[in-house]
Image: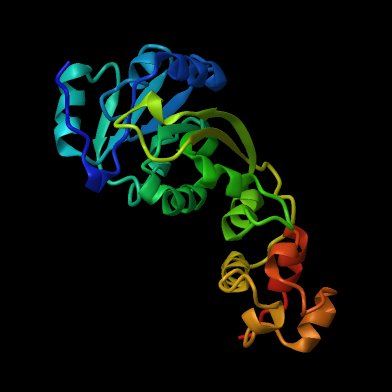
Amino acid sequence: MTLFQPRKRFGQHFLRERGVIERILHALNLQADDIVVEIGPGRGALTRGLVGRVAELHVVELDRDLVEFLRREFSPSQLTVHSADALRFDFRPLSHDQRRLRIIGNLPYNISTPLLFHLLDQVEVVQDMLFMLQKEVVERMAAGPGGKDYGRLSVMIQWRAQVEKLFNVPPGAFTPPPRVDSSVVRLVPHATPPVTVTDPGRFALTVQAAFAHRRKTLRNTLKGLVDESGFARAGIDPVRRAETLTLAEFARLACQVTG
């Protein structure tokens, strides 16, 4: 196998530990008719465990040198290589015959949060997602109200999907080793959202504004969005801070946004 030097600008840390790869494959519980999309396959360490086990395998890779490597290493009958930026990639056309996508990947830490939001915008074609992420990000995704890890990411992810942290991965499982620990997490989109959100745009705006200054009260962070009567109708004390609100309370507040 041709070895590629990881590129910092792509945030590349190639997974190399066989035991970790086997744990990921076990967690996937692949079915023969699955459509699997791997984001950032790199040198193909995980890809090799997917080839031949599912109906369709797609990989999305930004690094053009790795794209050429993957196209030499695997035949078109084994997988389809998409030379693209996952942050701008439209995943919807890959879903067909009422089969939704199973999306996996060792995501570059420097784009993980925007990429998660991009994928959640296409959640209607997603069966589940299983990602390797920075441990701190996974803890934020799974956090409940009241803790320091609870924030915008927690609320927006949990509104769209169930979050299940599976296991941690040490830096030594990668080349080069990252400076942080990693975790594998499973996201399963809700068949029915846990709360009713009538206007997703206002909901997102409310959550973003509320967490913009964590130490400030809701009265201050939502000034110009929710007035005193709005807080009263939502049944929420405006002297509370964003980190204390449940998902349902954010949904009620979003209904009171004016303008």
- Closest to the observer: 175 or 34? 175
In the drawing, does residue 84 fall left or right of residue 21? left
- Closest to the observer: 53 or 6? 6
Residue under the image location 39 percent in, 45 percent down: 109
Where residue 130 sits: x, y (%)?
51, 32
Q: Is residue 223 visible?
A: yes
Where residue 92 sits: x, y (%)?
42, 43
Numbered circles on residues, count = 0
Residue under the image location 34 percent in, 29 percent down: 58
- Image position of 12 with respect to 121: above or below: above
- Image position of 88 with respect to 91: above or below: below
Where residue 128 sits: x, y (%)?
55, 34
Which corner quadrant holds the C terminus?
bottom right
Q: In which quadrant of the rendered view does residue 63 lie?
A: top left
Which corner quadrant holds the N terminus?
top left
Q: What's the colour scheme?
A: rainbow
Q: Is residue 124 visible?
A: no
Q: In which quadrant of the rendered view does residue 218 lie?
A: bottom right
Residue under the image location 77 percent in, 60 percent down: 248
- Image position of 31 with respect to 180: above or below: above
Where residue 231 sits: x, y (%)?
78, 80
* Extreme-top residue of the structure: 52
- Image position of 37 with respect to 210: above or below: above
Q: In which quadrant of the rendered view does residue 173 lie?
A: top left
